[in-house]
Image: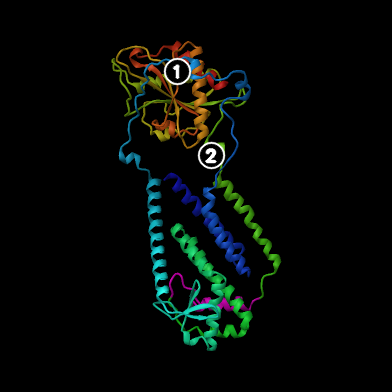
Amino acid sequence: MNNLFSYSIEANISLLILVSLFVLAFRQLSFFRWNRLLLIALVSFCTLVPLLKFKTDYVKLIDSKTNSNQEIQSPEQLGYSNAPFLIEPEEQLNLWDRIELKKILAYAYLLIVIFFLTRLVYRSLKLVCCLKKMDFQEHRGIKVIPPFNRFNNCSIFHYIIMDKSALENPEGKLIFAHEAQHILKGHAWDKLYIELMCCIFWINPAIYWVRKELHRLHEFQVDRAVGECYGKTDYASFLLNLTQQHQQIDYMQSRILKNQNELVERIDRLMRNLSPRTKGYQYLLLVPCIFVLIVSFSFINPTKEKITALTAVKNSVKTIVLDPGHGGKDNGATNSKGLKEKDLTLQACKMIQNELEKEGFQVVLTHSKDEFMMLKDRAAFTGDALVSIHFDVDPSNTKLPIGLFYPKAVELPKIQDQSREFAFRLTQNLKNQGLSTQKPVESHSHAILRGAKIPALIVSLGNMNTFSNTLDPQFISAFTHALKTSLSE
């Protein structure tokens, strides 16, 4: 639903921008056919641009030079311990915490779209059934049916709805010629398409303006075609004679006359000279505008997705995000001495932070005091890598190996690959420091891994029952050295 929310926002913003450009640059041009096609193309583009995703290049986790000299060992070569690995689960959010406003808005938007689409389909099928039941008369290859309901002097796809007895009088011939042009130019398909788009962009006032503008262009286009055939002056007089007639219409109906203001504009456009061809160069203004929209909504770059390679140039400052597991109302596990996991993880992260900063790393803690943070907020930090620190509890008071989790089936597949390589690299370096390790495990059940936008790991530093109120500085130093080596390679 988050993707649907983003799609609707980007599509509606694109529509507003492009319609504004059309009003400013193209509306007064007399290229009626091109403006008509342009409007349809712009609306179609707005539905597609949020779906286009172009990913820029990225740097792999393991540098090519390093990789050629030192291959990552397989799990069998590493000789992992088979000891059980338990991560204390994070506190489950209640129903209210799990409900996000943008998801509610996305569902509401989708439900209204479905409602409007259903109504459009129902009305269209109802109209088709009515047309099939009507008796028609073939006239110049077009089916003419008598007026019904609110339909009169209009065209619907290959039907013209008008009084058959009027086909031979001068006014009836002009009505027939007018509506026949609508059929020949396929205007009914435009109307059906724009009604479909009105269902999708129902919240956007720009789409209703587009619908009105399409009708305007249809009439301008047909008026000019009929005026060239029957004479502009005679056709203008015909339009003036219709000023007293009131036409009730439906959404599929093609109108000869809407109101007096429209009549004035139509006669003005009919009698006015066409825009010079050189004005067509104004359409080139669309190119930079479309380019900006594509770049804004369709390109996924490392800054936007916060993908940062661990193999940056040596001696550059790397930013490591340390996440003390649990905190605040979430105590985590509690050992036999009453020590809470949230206190131990915060202590461990601060000790690791001090060690890493001495080595020139920039370290950011997701929280530096005992406070509760939502998992989605903790996963949103940026940097070169995210390491979430946890502990296990085993009543046997035996030492447990260090265990690692890396993400599985996340939104960004490259993050999964980078995290996996990071996990195996760290495991290998931990063994080099003489620390017991467990085989890294991929996980989809940990929210902080699912939501991470940078390479991320959950690390369990062992059994809490084997620790006192303070952690062994030598153990933390050995772990930090392995972490530093893994980040630097």
Per the rendering, the mark at residue 304 is 2
Q: Nearer the viewer, mark 2 or mark 1?
A: 2
Secondary structure state at the residue bearing disc 1: helix
Residue that appears at 40% across and 16% down: 82
For the record, the magenta segment spans: 249-272
Label 1: how many Cα within 10 Å (few below 14, some 14–19, many 20+): some
Label 2: how many Cα within 10 Å (few below 14, some 14–19, many 20+): few
Quarter the C terminus occupies: top right
The residue closer to the viewer here, 437 or 348, is 437
Secondary structure state at the residue bearing disc 2: helix
Residue 308 at x, y percent in the picture: 55, 31
The residue closer to the viewer here, 224 or 352, is 224
**228 over 215 or under it: above or below:** below
The residue closer to the viewer here, 105 or 395, is 395
**Direction from residue 145 to residue 269 in the image, left or right:** right
Residue that appears at 46% across and 70% down: 252
Residue 145 at x, y percent in the picture: 45, 79
Mark 2 vs 1, N-terminal side: 2
Q: Residue furthest right?
A: 278
Q: Residue furthest bottom?
A: 169
Q: Is residue 208 magenta?
A: no
Q: Amino acid at mark 2?
A: Lys
The residue closer to the viewer here, 260 or 177, is 177
Q: Which residue is mark 1?
A: 351
The reply to whether discs 2 and 1 touch (Cβ–Cβ < 8 Å) is no
Q: Could one spot residue 454 in this view of the protein?
A: no
Q: Amino acid at mark 1?
A: Met
Residue 291 at x, y percent in the picture: 61, 50
